Amino acid sequence: MQEQTFTDFKQFRRKVRAKNPEFEQALKEYFANGGIVRVLINTSKEWPKLLYPSQQRLRALLREKKKQKQEFMARKSTWQKRLFNAELYNITNFLKKYAEPLYWRHVLKYIADSDYRNDAKSVKLPVNLVADPRWKPMIKMFVEDIDYRKQLRLTVEESFVYKKDKKLAKYSQQLIEFRKQESQRKIDELNKKIEELDKEIDILKKLLRWAKA
Protein backbone atom coordinates (compact mmCIF):
# COMPACT_ATOMS: atom_id res chain seq x y z
CA MET A 1 0.00 0.00 0.00
CA GLN A 2 1.49 3.32 -1.04
CA GLU A 3 0.54 6.96 -1.67
CA GLN A 4 1.32 8.32 -5.11
CA THR A 5 0.88 11.72 -6.81
CA PHE A 6 -0.01 11.97 -10.51
CA THR A 7 -0.31 14.78 -13.05
CA ASP A 8 -0.68 12.63 -16.14
CA PHE A 9 -3.01 9.75 -17.04
CA LYS A 10 -0.32 7.62 -18.73
CA GLN A 11 1.75 7.89 -15.57
CA PHE A 12 -1.33 6.90 -13.55
CA ARG A 13 -2.04 3.92 -15.85
CA ARG A 14 1.49 2.56 -15.41
CA LYS A 15 0.83 2.23 -11.66
CA VAL A 16 -2.90 1.37 -11.72
CA ARG A 17 -4.14 -1.41 -13.99
CA ALA A 18 -7.65 -1.57 -12.56
CA LYS A 19 -10.48 -0.28 -14.78
CA ASN A 20 -13.18 2.22 -13.85
CA PRO A 21 -14.55 3.87 -17.05
CA GLU A 22 -16.46 6.66 -15.29
CA PHE A 23 -13.61 7.79 -13.06
CA GLU A 24 -10.98 7.20 -15.77
CA GLN A 25 -12.67 9.63 -18.16
CA ALA A 26 -13.07 12.23 -15.41
CA LEU A 27 -9.42 11.77 -14.48
CA LYS A 28 -8.25 12.22 -18.10
CA GLU A 29 -10.20 15.46 -18.39
CA TYR A 30 -9.05 16.63 -14.96
CA PHE A 31 -5.41 16.08 -15.95
CA ALA A 32 -6.02 17.86 -19.27
CA ASN A 33 -7.10 20.92 -17.26
CA GLY A 34 -3.87 20.84 -15.23
CA GLY A 35 -5.21 18.87 -12.27
CA ILE A 36 -3.16 16.94 -9.72
CA VAL A 37 -4.30 13.87 -7.78
CA ARG A 38 -2.84 11.94 -4.86
CA VAL A 39 -4.11 8.41 -4.39
CA LEU A 40 -3.65 5.49 -2.04
CA ILE A 41 -2.79 2.39 -4.05
CA ASN A 42 -3.41 -1.01 -2.45
CA THR A 43 -2.48 -3.13 -5.48
CA SER A 44 -2.28 -2.26 -9.19
CA LYS A 45 -5.34 -4.45 -9.78
CA GLU A 46 -7.57 -2.43 -7.44
CA TRP A 47 -8.93 1.03 -8.16
CA PRO A 48 -7.13 3.35 -5.70
CA LYS A 49 -8.61 5.62 -3.04
CA LEU A 50 -8.57 9.34 -3.86
CA LEU A 51 -6.75 11.37 -1.18
CA TYR A 52 -6.34 14.68 -3.01
CA PRO A 53 -8.33 16.61 -3.93
CA SER A 54 -10.25 15.83 -0.76
CA GLN A 55 -14.04 15.86 -0.45
CA GLN A 56 -13.82 19.25 1.23
CA ARG A 57 -11.65 20.65 -1.57
CA LEU A 58 -13.91 19.23 -4.29
CA ARG A 59 -17.03 20.68 -2.65
CA ALA A 60 -15.33 24.08 -2.46
CA LEU A 61 -14.37 23.87 -6.14
CA LEU A 62 -17.91 22.86 -7.07
CA ARG A 63 -19.35 25.85 -5.20
CA GLU A 64 -16.86 28.13 -6.96
CA LYS A 65 -17.66 26.75 -10.42
CA LYS A 66 -21.42 26.89 -9.84
CA LYS A 67 -21.12 30.50 -8.69
CA GLN A 68 -19.14 31.34 -11.82
CA LYS A 69 -21.81 29.67 -13.94
CA GLN A 70 -24.56 31.71 -12.27
CA GLU A 71 -22.60 34.91 -12.99
CA PHE A 72 -22.15 33.95 -16.64
CA MET A 73 -25.83 33.04 -16.91
CA ALA A 74 -26.81 36.45 -15.51
CA ARG A 75 -24.51 38.21 -17.99
CA LYS A 76 -25.90 36.08 -20.80
CA SER A 77 -29.44 37.07 -19.82
CA THR A 78 -28.46 40.77 -20.00
CA TRP A 79 -26.98 40.35 -23.48
CA GLN A 80 -30.01 38.36 -24.62
CA LYS A 81 -32.22 41.25 -23.51
CA ARG A 82 -30.06 43.70 -25.46
CA LEU A 83 -30.24 41.49 -28.54
CA PHE A 84 -34.02 41.20 -28.19
CA ASN A 85 -34.37 44.99 -27.86
CA ALA A 86 -32.15 45.58 -30.89
CA GLU A 87 -34.13 43.09 -32.97
CA LEU A 88 -37.39 44.76 -31.94
CA TYR A 89 -36.14 48.33 -32.43
CA ASN A 90 -37.61 48.91 -35.90
CA ILE A 91 -40.88 47.12 -35.17
CA THR A 92 -41.35 48.92 -31.84
CA ASN A 93 -40.71 52.34 -33.34
CA PHE A 94 -42.92 51.57 -36.33
CA LEU A 95 -45.83 50.87 -33.98
CA LYS A 96 -45.07 53.68 -31.51
CA LYS A 97 -45.16 56.34 -34.22
CA TYR A 98 -48.96 56.04 -34.47
CA ALA A 99 -49.26 57.39 -30.91
CA GLU A 100 -47.16 60.46 -31.75
CA PRO A 101 -49.11 63.62 -32.77
CA LEU A 102 -45.98 64.77 -34.59
CA TYR A 103 -46.22 61.79 -36.92
CA TRP A 104 -49.76 62.76 -37.98
CA ARG A 105 -48.69 66.38 -38.51
CA HIS A 106 -46.03 65.06 -40.85
CA VAL A 107 -48.58 62.87 -42.69
CA LEU A 108 -50.95 65.81 -43.23
CA LYS A 109 -48.18 68.04 -44.54
CA TYR A 110 -46.84 65.21 -46.70
CA ILE A 111 -50.27 64.82 -48.35
CA ALA A 112 -51.17 68.50 -48.66
CA ASP A 113 -47.81 70.18 -49.38
CA SER A 114 -45.91 69.00 -52.46
CA ASP A 115 -42.84 71.09 -51.56
CA TYR A 116 -42.70 69.47 -48.12
CA ARG A 117 -43.24 66.05 -49.69
CA ASN A 118 -40.32 66.55 -52.08
CA ASP A 119 -38.05 67.64 -49.21
CA ALA A 120 -39.06 64.62 -47.11
CA LYS A 121 -38.40 62.26 -50.02
CA SER A 122 -35.08 63.91 -50.81
CA VAL A 123 -33.64 63.39 -47.33
CA LYS A 124 -35.45 60.09 -46.78
CA LEU A 125 -36.92 61.52 -43.55
CA PRO A 126 -36.86 58.71 -40.95
CA VAL A 127 -40.37 59.44 -39.74
CA ASN A 128 -40.74 55.83 -38.51
CA LEU A 129 -38.30 56.83 -35.74
CA VAL A 130 -40.39 59.77 -34.52
CA ALA A 131 -40.94 58.00 -31.17
CA ASP A 132 -37.18 57.67 -30.63
CA PRO A 133 -35.99 60.56 -28.39
CA ARG A 134 -32.78 60.78 -30.42
CA TRP A 135 -34.63 61.44 -33.69
CA LYS A 136 -37.79 63.23 -32.57
CA PRO A 137 -36.20 66.73 -32.17
CA MET A 138 -34.79 66.62 -35.70
CA ILE A 139 -38.08 65.41 -37.19
CA LYS A 140 -39.94 68.11 -35.21
CA MET A 141 -37.67 70.81 -36.63
CA PHE A 142 -38.12 69.37 -40.13
CA VAL A 143 -41.91 69.50 -39.82
CA GLU A 144 -42.10 72.95 -38.21
CA ASP A 145 -39.18 74.98 -39.58
CA ILE A 146 -38.95 75.50 -43.35
CA ASP A 147 -35.47 77.06 -43.11
CA TYR A 148 -34.17 74.05 -41.20
CA ARG A 149 -35.84 71.72 -43.70
CA LYS A 150 -34.27 73.42 -46.72
CA GLN A 151 -30.85 73.52 -45.07
CA LEU A 152 -31.09 69.84 -44.19
CA ARG A 153 -32.03 68.96 -47.77
CA LEU A 154 -29.10 71.00 -49.07
CA THR A 155 -26.75 69.29 -46.65
CA VAL A 156 -27.92 65.81 -47.63
CA GLU A 157 -27.72 66.58 -51.35
CA GLU A 158 -24.31 68.24 -51.30
CA SER A 159 -22.41 66.81 -48.33
CA PHE A 160 -19.70 64.21 -48.94
CA VAL A 161 -21.09 62.25 -45.96
CA TYR A 162 -24.31 61.50 -47.86
CA LYS A 163 -22.70 61.14 -51.29
CA LYS A 164 -23.26 57.38 -51.59
CA ASP A 165 -26.39 57.03 -49.45
CA LYS A 166 -28.77 59.96 -49.00
CA LYS A 167 -30.41 58.44 -45.94
CA LEU A 168 -30.47 60.29 -42.63
CA ALA A 169 -31.18 57.22 -40.52
CA LYS A 170 -28.35 55.16 -42.01
CA TYR A 171 -26.20 55.62 -38.88
CA SER A 172 -29.10 54.57 -36.65
CA GLN A 173 -29.56 51.34 -38.61
CA GLN A 174 -25.83 50.68 -38.57
CA LEU A 175 -25.83 51.17 -34.80
CA ILE A 176 -28.69 48.69 -34.40
CA GLU A 177 -26.86 46.12 -36.56
CA PHE A 178 -23.70 46.65 -34.51
CA ARG A 179 -25.64 46.11 -31.27
CA LYS A 180 -27.18 42.93 -32.64
CA GLN A 181 -23.83 41.54 -33.78
CA GLU A 182 -22.05 42.54 -30.56
CA SER A 183 -24.84 41.04 -28.41
CA GLN A 184 -24.76 37.77 -30.35
CA ARG A 185 -20.96 37.66 -30.11
CA LYS A 186 -21.13 38.09 -26.33
CA ILE A 187 -23.86 35.44 -26.04
CA ASP A 188 -21.78 32.96 -28.08
CA GLU A 189 -18.73 33.76 -25.95
CA LEU A 190 -20.66 33.21 -22.72
CA ASN A 191 -22.25 30.02 -24.04
CA LYS A 192 -18.76 28.64 -24.63
CA LYS A 193 -17.68 29.56 -21.10
CA ILE A 194 -20.85 28.04 -19.61
CA GLU A 195 -20.32 24.85 -21.63
CA GLU A 196 -16.73 24.61 -20.34
CA LEU A 197 -17.92 25.14 -16.77
CA ASP A 198 -20.56 22.43 -17.17
CA LYS A 199 -17.81 20.02 -18.18
CA GLU A 200 -15.65 21.05 -15.21
CA ILE A 201 -18.60 20.68 -12.84
CA ASP A 202 -19.31 17.21 -14.22
CA ILE A 203 -15.65 16.21 -13.71
CA LEU A 204 -15.66 17.51 -10.13
CA LYS A 205 -18.88 15.64 -9.33
CA LYS A 206 -17.35 12.39 -10.57
CA LEU A 207 -14.18 13.00 -8.58
CA LEU A 208 -16.31 13.68 -5.51
CA ARG A 209 -18.07 10.34 -5.97
CA TRP A 210 -14.61 8.74 -6.21
CA ALA A 211 -13.46 10.54 -3.06
CA LYS A 212 -16.51 9.22 -1.21
CA ALA A 213 -16.02 5.63 -2.41
Image (cartoon, grey):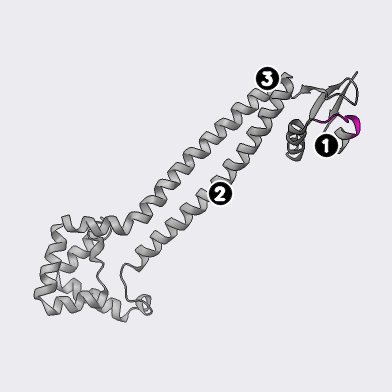
* Closer to the eye: label 1 or 2: 1
**Quadrant in the picture for the N terminus:** top right
**Residue designated by label 1:** 9
Give the main secondary structure, helix, strand or loop, of the magenta stretch: loop
Residues in magenta, as a range:
14-19
How far is the residue under mark 1 from the one under mark 3?
Answer: 23 Å
User: Residue at (40%, 46%) from the top-left corner?
Assistant: 81
The residue at the point 14 percent across, 68 percent down is 107
Callout 1: helix, strand or loop? Answer: helix
Which residue is pictured at 82% across the width and 31% down the height?
19
Q: Nearer the viewer, residue 76 or 157?
A: 76
* Within-10-Å neighbours for mark 1: few <14, some 14–19, many 20+: some
Q: Is residue 18 magenta?
A: yes
Would residue 85 appear left or right of 127 to someone viewing this image?
right
C-alpha gap between disc 2 and disc 3:
31 Å
Instruction: Describe residue 10's horizontal placement relative to residue 55 as left or right.
Output: right
In terms of secondary structure, where does tag 3 sit?
Answer: helix
Residue under label 2, please give it.
Answer: 189
Comes first in the chain, label 2 or label 3: 3
> Visible in this render: residue 168?
yes
Q: Which residue is mark 3?
A: 56
**Secondary structure beneath label 2:** helix
| Residue 44 point in image, percent of width and height | 90, 26
- In the rendered image, which quarter contains the C terminus? top right
Is 167 situated left or right of 81 in this image?
left
Question: What is the distance, in whole Å, between disc 1 and disc 2 at their CAs?
Answer: 30 Å
**Displayed quadrant of residue 152:** bottom left
Vertical relation: 2 (above or below) 163: above
Amino acid beneath label 3: Gln
Q: Nearer the viewer, mark 1 or mark 3?
A: 1
Residue 170, compared with residue 134, is above or below; it is below
